[in-house]
Structure formats: structure tokens, C-alpha cells
Amino acid sequence: MKAEGALRKMQKMKLCNGRKVRYTIPLPAKFIRFIKSKSIKTILELGCGYGRACFFLRKSNLCVTGVDVDREQVESALQEMKAQGISEGIDFIINDVRNLCFPDSSFDAVTMLGILTLVSKKERSKLMSEARRVLKPFGYLSIEEFGRTWENPIYRKRYKDDVKVTCELGTVTVRDEMGGILHFGHHFSRKEICHLLRGFCTISLEKDVFTSYYHRNWVNGYIILAQKRPNSAQQRH
């Protein structure tokens, strides 16, 4: 599948000559501060890569499960776990985030850091449905994602040029040094984010600015906290 290929390519970019590289999207520090007063014990990280966010979450004494479609990334996470001397509290599983292997209502919280950007438009709702399915009733969802950045002339040009290739406004091409397309990446409008949060009660939706560690360019971002509600509950955004 094209979407799975994009996920794999992006995950491989997270390792550079065998070394871990820094990320544009920050660690979920605001989420950790929020859940300190909550009865949260189990967290699922979707698209965990080599475990960067999982190890961060584990420091707060949470039981963390990380899933990723890329075997290489999961193996790297397991090696890092061993190197840190961690013997419990974290599990890493090879699993497609659009078809999770867990039963319904398995986790107190789900985190997603820059994973929706890689998923095609028609499959984003599927990913959100899976996140909601594995959350316990009234469980929490933490999302950090790229936002539409028309005020940055670099992205304004890319949106206008790349839509001819991606066929979706706000989706840009990510290319290698030779100009070949590695994958697409979507920058969300607030309306798109709110649409994806159907089935959740939005607690906070904050706009932020992320700085790329690759080329020091800046892009808008969203830091989102939501809660799973029963189907009959009224949602607010």
C-alpha cells in the first residue's frame, strides 16, 4: 500500500547512518503535565520509531507500548531499551497503526506525534477510529501535528507547486538529495483537525511553532488533547 510505503520511508529517515537524529515535533511534555493528576497507567504510542517518546513517557512511571510498521525501527527501540537497562514497563510491537492488534478499550491514553501527516487523506479517519477503539471509555488522546503555514513563503510556494503532484492542498513532497520523492507530508488546517476529532471531546487545541532540526525552517503546529466520549455524548471543538 502507498500509505504504508510512506510510513516506512519516513521511519527510515529517523535513523541517519545508524545514528538517531533529532525531531521537529517536540516530546509530549504538556501531556505529561496534564495527566499527573489523572489515573493513567497504560499508554499506546502510535508510530513510535526507535522509541524516543516511549522512553520519555516511561520516565513518568507509565506502562508504555510502542507500535511501528517498520521492523528496523522496532529492533532499534529494543536495542535502546537494552542499552538503557530497562527490563519492564515498555513493549515494542511491529504493527500497522491503521489496523491495531489490540482489543477494544485496552489503553488509558494514546499518543500520536507527527504520524497523521504521513497517512493519506482517505485513511486518516481510519487511523483515528483505531485510536478511539483501543482507548478505554473517557481515555485521553494526545496529538502533535504539522499545521498549515501560509505565512511562511517557503511553504506557501510548496503548497502551490506540490498540489500538482499530491492532488491535495497542504500536502507537500519530501524529497531526497537527488530530488526524488521520498513521501508526502500533510500540513493540517484547523478545520481538518477538528473534523478528525469527531468522537472525541476536545480539551485543548493549541497552535504552536515547530522548528526543523534538518534545515532550521519553521512550520506551524498543533498540540491537541482530547478525551474519548461515548457515542451519545455531545462533542465540542
Image (tube, rainbow, N blue to C red):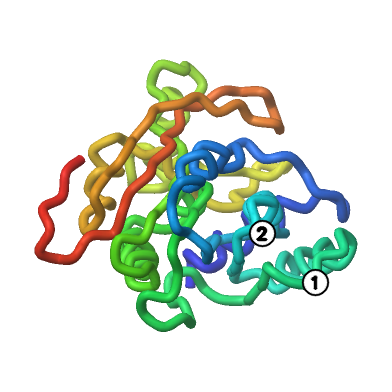
Residue 106 vs residue 191, the one in the foreground: 106
| Badge 2 amino acid | Gly
| Badge 1 amino acid | Ser
How many numbered circles does the render carry? 2
Position of residue 78 measured from the top left corner of the image (x, y, whole percent): 78, 69
Residue 156 vs residue 11: left or right?
A: left
Q: Residues within 10 Å of mark 1 (few under 14, many from 20)?
A: few
Q: Quadrant of residue 161?
A: top left
Residue 202 vs residue 119: left or right?
A: left
Quadrant where the C terminus lies? top left
Residue 123 vs residue 158: left or right?
A: left
Residue at position x 63%, y 76% from top? 93
Alpha carbon distance from label 2 to label 1:
19 Å
- Residue 195 against residue 65 in the figure, above or below: above
Residue 196 vs residue 81, the one in the foreground: 81
Residue 40 vs residue 128, the one in the foreground: 40
Looking at the rendered structure, the secondary structure element under dot 2 is: loop
- Residue 187 against residue 80 in the figure, above or below: above
Residue at position x 60%, y 37% from top? 26
Sequence-wise, the earlier of marks 2 and 1 is 2
List the residue tagged with mark 2: 49
Q: Residues within 10 Å of mark 2 (few under 14, many from 20)?
A: many
Q: Quadrant of residue 51?
A: bottom right
Residue 71 vs residue 78, the one in the foreground: 78
Position of residue 18 measured from the top left corner of the image (x, y, whole percent): 87, 55
List the residue tagged with mark 1: 87
Residue 127 vs residue 215: left or right?
A: left
Nearest to viewer (mark 2 / mark 1): 1
Position of residue 23 measured from the top left corner of the image (x, y, whole percent): 67, 40
**Residue 74 — which label?**
none
Residue at position x 83%, y 61% from top? 80
Residue at position x 49%, y 55% from top? 111
